[in-house]
Image: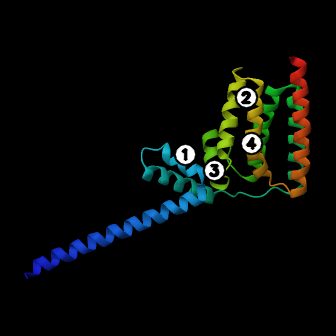
């Protein structure tokens, strides 16, 4: 067999092996990103021009996040923010729109203290998605409802949903202790009861 045939065979084998290796690395990359980002993986890849572009965006988020100095809140700060949230919930009974605006501002304050840049909402959401992929979509929904509230395009139920969406991220950012979670849960029940009473009065 001519030597050039062996060369062609060798090149073909190398190409096949390279393809197999590339596919293996791609599957590993996909698996790692799926595990890290959870539902945010499907959202990002589904909204991108291609799977490769979506995964590249997620990797870029992770690289940016690694450069940020994210720090936990002190115990005193956590307690202060938890009290502030309870005040915002109490405000919702008489001023739902103002409470949603206050909740949005409070979350930005928590993010700033923890080290997240907060200048642009989309970038905020992208940064938070690396550490809190399970609840970042709640943040987006809450923000959209808050924007609708600012223009008067809202209802009490939509504002109520915005508060719930914001709460999901707030809980993870503040990282409360178990006993604090129980106390806040009881406060939520009381706030809901007050809201229902207000609704009955309005009707």
Q: Would you call the spot at circle 4 few (<14 residues within 10 Å), some (14-19), or many (20 or more)?
A: some
Quarter containing the N terminus: bottom left
Q: Would you call the spot at circle 1 few (<14 residues within 10 Å), some (14-19), or many (20 or more)?
A: few
Q: Label 1 vs label 4: CA separation?
A: 23 Å
**Among numbered discs 4 and 2, the one appearing first in the sequence:** 4
Identify the residue at horizontal 89%, vertical 51% (top origin).
182
Q: Label 1 vs label 3: CA separation?
A: 11 Å
Q: Would you call the spot at circle 2 few (<14 residues within 10 Å), some (14-19), or many (20 or more)?
A: some
| Element carrying mark 2 | helix
Q: In the image, which disc is placed on residue 43?
A: 1
**Among numbered discs 2 and 3, the one appearing first in the sequence:** 3
Answer whether labels 1 and 4 touch (C-beta < 8 Å): no
The x and y percentages for residue 8 are 16, 74
- Examine the rendered structure and indicate whether residue 54 appears above or below residue 192: below
Residue at mark 2: 158
In this rendering, position of residue 78 left or right of residue 67: right
The x and y percentages for residue 81 are 86, 46
Q: In the image, which disc is placed on residue 129?
A: 3
Mark 3 or mark 4, whichever is nearer to me: 3
In this rendering, position of residue 200 left or right of residue 18: right
Mark 1 or mark 3, whichever is nearer to me: 1
The x and y percentages for residue 96 are 82, 27
Q: Label 3 vs label 4: CA separation?
A: 15 Å
Identify the residue at horizontal 28%, vertical 70% (top origin).
16
Identify the residue at horizontal 49%, vertical 54% (top origin).
55
């Amino acid at each position: 067999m001519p030597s050039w045939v062996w060369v062609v065979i060798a090149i073909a084998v190398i190409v096949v092996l390279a393809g197999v290796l590339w596919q293996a690395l791609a599957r590993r990359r996909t698996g790692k990103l799926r595990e890290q980002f959870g539902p945010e993986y499907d959202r990002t890849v589904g909204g991108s021009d291609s799977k490769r572009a979506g995964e590249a965006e997620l990797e870029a988020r992770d690289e940016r996040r690694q450069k940020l100095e994210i720090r936990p809140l002190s115990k005193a700060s956590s307690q202060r923010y938890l009290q502030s949230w309870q005040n915002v919930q109490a405000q919702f009974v008489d001023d739902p729109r103002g409470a949603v605006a206050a909740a949005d501002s409070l979350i930005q304050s928590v993010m700033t203290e923890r080290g997240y840049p907060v200048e642009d909402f989309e970038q905020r959401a992208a940064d938070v998605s690396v550490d809190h992929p399970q609840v970042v979509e709640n943040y987006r929904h809450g923000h959209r409802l808050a924007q609708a509230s600012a223009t008067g395009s809202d209802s009490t139920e939509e504002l109520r949903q915005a508060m719930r969406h914001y709460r999901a991220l707030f809980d993870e950012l503040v990282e409360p202790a178990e006993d604090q979670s129980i106390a806040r849960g009881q406060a939520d029940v009381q706030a809901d009861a007050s809201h229902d009473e207000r609704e009955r009065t309005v009707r």
